[in-house]
Every structure is written in structure tokens, then in C-alpha cells.
Image (spheres, rainbow, N blue to C red):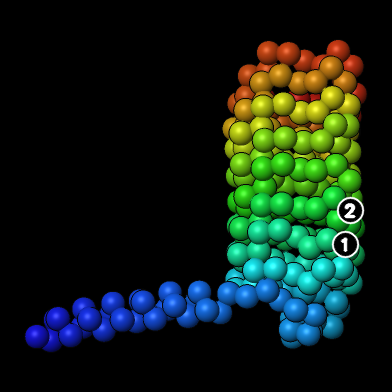
Amino acid sequence: MMRLFRCSCALYLFSLSIAFSFVSAEPLDEYQILNHIDNYGNVYLRNKPYTALPDGLEVKGNLNIAKTPIQILPPGLVVNGSLDASNSQLKSVRRGTKIKGYANFLGSYIEKWPSGVSVGGYLNFTDTPLKSLPPRLHVKGDLSVIRTPLTELPNGIVVEGNLYIGGSGVRQFPDDMTVKGNIFLGGNQISKWPKNLTLGGAVAR
């Protein structure tokens, strides 16, 4: 009888926790966000249950939405620091989004990176389902597509830092490519190299 009682209690508590999580998941409005801003203008939402951010949001510092159920960034978003969306449910970034620092999407659900997004630092797509990058992409830091299904880099791509492609589907490089740092192949065998490659560092296999 006692064992049955314990089992019933455990099942009840588990069901209650799921119900609570479902109920507590909600969009973040312009007033609630004030509770998550520190003295430096950083917005820290890691592990919070919010599903959306306010339209036209401008963050004075960094924005951390890691491990949140947020699936799309709002229109008009400006982040004057860096964005951490690692291990979140994020699937889409709108054109016109501005991020002055780096953008970390490790373990998120980004499949397509649109044109018209401004990022001032590195771009990390490691362990995402990324399948496409826009033409003539210019990355102002490192670019990582490690362990993504991406099969090709856009022609005319410029990476001001290092390029990491290990474990991705990339087996050929575009005709025109600039990498100002190093290229880390991570074991990928490249069958086609650029006709016009500007490389500031070395190639590490």
C-alpha cells in the first residue's frame, strides 16, 4: 500500500510540474522585461519560460535567451551587446535585426540565415540544423558551422576570423572566398577549392 501511495504521489507531482510549465510559458511584455535588466543594460532570460520578446526591443547590453522556448526574434530587435541563444528553441531571425557583438546559436534550431541581419562579431551555428547562408555573407569574426547539415558556403563569403567546418556537410568551397584567419577542416575532405582564395592564416586538417 505504501509503495502504491509513493508511486501515485510521484506521478501527481510529475503531472503538476508539466502543467505548471505549460501554464507559465508566456510572451514577455515591455513591463515584465524590466525585472530582467541589470545595471549594465543586460537582459538575462536564460532558462526562463518566455515564448516571445516585445516588438522593437532595444537592449543596451547583452541579450541572453539561452535554453528558452523563444522560436523567433521580434521585428526591429537591436542588441547593442552580444546575443546568446544557445540551446534555445530559436528557429528564425528576422531581416533587419542588429547585433553589435557576437551571436551564439549553438544547439538552437536555426535552419536558414537571412540576408539583412547585422552582426558585429562571431557567428556560431554549431550543432544546429543550418542548411543555407545568404550570398556574399560577411562575418566580422569567426564562423562555425560545425556538425551542421550545411553543404555549401556562399560565393564571395568573407570571414574576418577563423572558419570551422568540421562535421558539416561542406565538401566543396565556392570559387571566391576570403578567410582572414585560419580554416579548420575538422576532418572534412575538400574536393573543390576556391579559384580565388584570400587566406590570412593556415589550413588545419
What element does badge 1 sit on?
loop
What element does badge 2 sit on?
loop
Q: Is residue 118 left or right of residue 44?
A: right
Mark 1 or mark 2, which has the lower sequence index? 1
Q: Callout 1: 10 Å neighbours few (<14), some, many (20+)?
A: some
Q: Is residue 181 left or right of residue 88?
A: right
Q: Is residue 145 left or right of residue 138?
A: left
Task: Give the amino acid at mark 1.
Answer: Gly
Quadrant for the C terminus, please: top right
Task: Give the amino acid at mark 2.
Answer: Gly
Q: Position of residue 91 (x, y in %)?
A: 66, 52
Above or below, 47 relative to 185: below
Q: Which mark is residue 96?
A: 2
Above or below, 23 relative to 104: below
Where is mark 1, residue-wise? 76
Give me the residue at 86% from left, 78% from top.
40
Q: Position of residue 39 (x, y in %)?
A: 84, 83
Residue 203 appears in the figure = yes
Q: Position of residue 85 (x, y in %)?
A: 69, 59
Q: How many marks?
A: 2
* Residue nearer the viewer, 23 or 36: 23
- Name the quadrant containing residue 202: top right
- Name the quadrant containing residue 184: top right
Marks 1 and 2: CB-CB under 8 Å?
yes
Give me the residue at 63% from left, 19% from top.
189
Quadrant for the N terminus, please: bottom left
Above or below, 165 relative to 193: below
Residue 37 appears in the figure = no
- Name the quadrant containing residue 131: top right
Give me the residue at 67% from left, 47% from top.
110
Give me the residue at 34% from left, 81% from top.
13
Q: Position of residue 30 (x, y in %)?
A: 80, 80
